[in-house]
Image (spheres, rainbow, N blue to C red):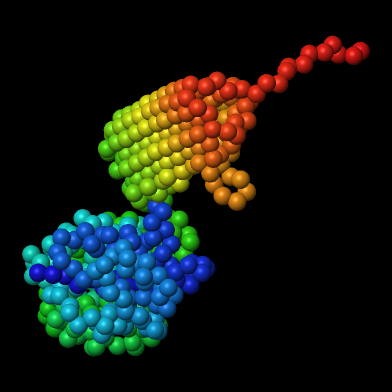
Amino acid sequence: MSLSIIVLAAGKGSRMISSKPKVLHEVGNYPMLFHVLDACNSLKKKKNINLVISKTLLDFTDEIKKKYSNITFSLQEKQNGTADAVKVAIAKNKNFSDQTIVICGDTPLISKSTLQKALKHFLINKLDLSVISMIPKIKKNSYGKLRFEKDKLISIVEQIENKKTQENSDICNSGIMIVNTKKLLENINLIKNKNKKNEYYLTDLVEIFSKKKFSVNHFPCKFEETLGVNSMNDLAIVNQEFQKIKRNYFLNNGVFMQDPDSVYFSFDTKIGLNVRIQPNVYFGKSVIIKNGVTLRSFSYLDNVKVFENVIIGPFARIRDGVKIEKDSKVGNFVEVKKSQIGQDVKVSHLSYIGDSIIKNNCNIGAGAITCNYDGKKKNKTMIGENCFIGSNSSLVAPLKIKKGSLIGAGTVVNRDIPDGTVVYRKSELIKKNKKK
Ligand code: UD1
Ligand code: MG
């Protein structure tokens, strides 16, 4: 049995005050929409996903399609409400499966397991419609409220339509619904837009189904998973919540963090066993940390693979495709960019290593710099095994320093150096008596 998923992402997003489409704003360095699509794709059934978009997303459809091949797009010209958006998706896609999930593209924290459990609940109980529900932490909120009669869900009342006299529960609509596709298709046109916003509310389907005695129910989930983003403020809250989830995940997987609240992860950060993280460490995208690594305070890592027992920081910046092999050390105020660092290499203080390959057992002295940029392009530096690069050396790339060489302190090296060579510039140290 296969599954259809309609992802609603055509909302205006005007409260973001941003030229970027709302659902492409990032949570944990990953677009909100991709979080939602990944959760949908994690469902075990074969599925087709229909993404309802507005014109602002048209420029990004190729990029999205490249990542999610099972996606089709429907353009909603005018934002006439969530039921209208679903109608647009239905009109475009003739091959709907038996069940349809409708989900919003701006609720990035919804978990795979909640979707899986909700779907299972829907199938086992042979439901026609199930709303994923939650109880908001704040009583005064803008969510649609579930209404019950003798414990039976009978309707959802949007906040704006809420008459004070109406008896509502604290249980609210998360915005996610699972519905029998046949009945959805047969009934969606019964939804009217006679309401304060003149919009077609998908939530009205609950009352229609309930009146027809279809089996309607709700599936509760954690409020935090349903947090939606309408403004930069919401985005900050969701990002904070995302960090809490990641911190808990890593703590539960044996990562030591002295001050978890000061450590920031990305959606794809991977960390091995016996890793220690001091306060204020930032993980950008594509960071892999292997076992036994120590990350000292104020280190910034972005697109980096760090092997066993490496020590990094404090105050290290490592970025743009760096590999650091085991037992090496990248110390304080060191920047490493697009480079490979071998085993047992020490770059302990105040260096810049850019576009370089440093082989095993090298020592890079304090303040040694690879001069990789000639004003036009970036050039490469290669340093062979067992080299000693003296403090304050300037290694002018393109440059090859072959294995076992020693560069004296303060040397500007602008020619390739053969194996086992000692290199230094001769300049006398002049001593004079100070004139009185
Ligand atoms: C909606 C629900 C509400 C629920 C809340 C949860 C309705 C009528 N209300 O309200 O019960 O508690 O979500 O967050 O469904 N969209 C379109 N086209 C449109 C309108 C909206 O694609 O014409 C998309 C938006 O991009 C968004 C989603 O649908 O992803 C929900 O729309 P939004 O306007 O945010 O609805 P809420 O007022 O939050
Ligand atoms: Mg919303």
Answer left or right for 386 relative to 72: right
- Give whichever of 267, 334 is nearer the camera: 334
- Asked if one can make out residue 332 in the rendered structure from this viewpoint, the answer is no
- On the image, the x and y values in percent for residue 300 come to 47, 41
Q: Is residue 379 above or below residue 94?
A: above
- Give whichever of 200, 386 is nearer the camera: 386
Query: Which quadrant of the rendered structure holds the C terminus?
Result: top right
Residue at image position (23%, 57%) is: 112
Residue at image position (28%, 74%) is: 72
The quarter holding residue 172 reads bottom left
- On the image, the x and y values in percent for residue 270 come to 32, 42
The quarter holding residue 307 reads top left
Q: Is residue 116 above or below residue 275?
A: below
- On the image, the x and y values in percent for residue 3 come to 16, 70
Residue at image position (53%, 44%) is: 379
- Give whichever of 324, 143 is nearer the camera: 324
Residue farthest along the right direction in this orientation: 436
What is the tally of numbered marks visible in this picture? 0
- Asked if one can make out residue 321 in the rendered structure from this viewpoint, the answer is yes
Query: Which quadrant of the rendered structure holds the N terminus?
Result: bottom left
Residue farthest along the front direction in this orientation: 418
Residue at image position (57%, 30%) is: 368
- On the image, the x and y values in percent for residue 24 come to 41, 64
Q: Is residue 199 above or below residue 149?
A: below
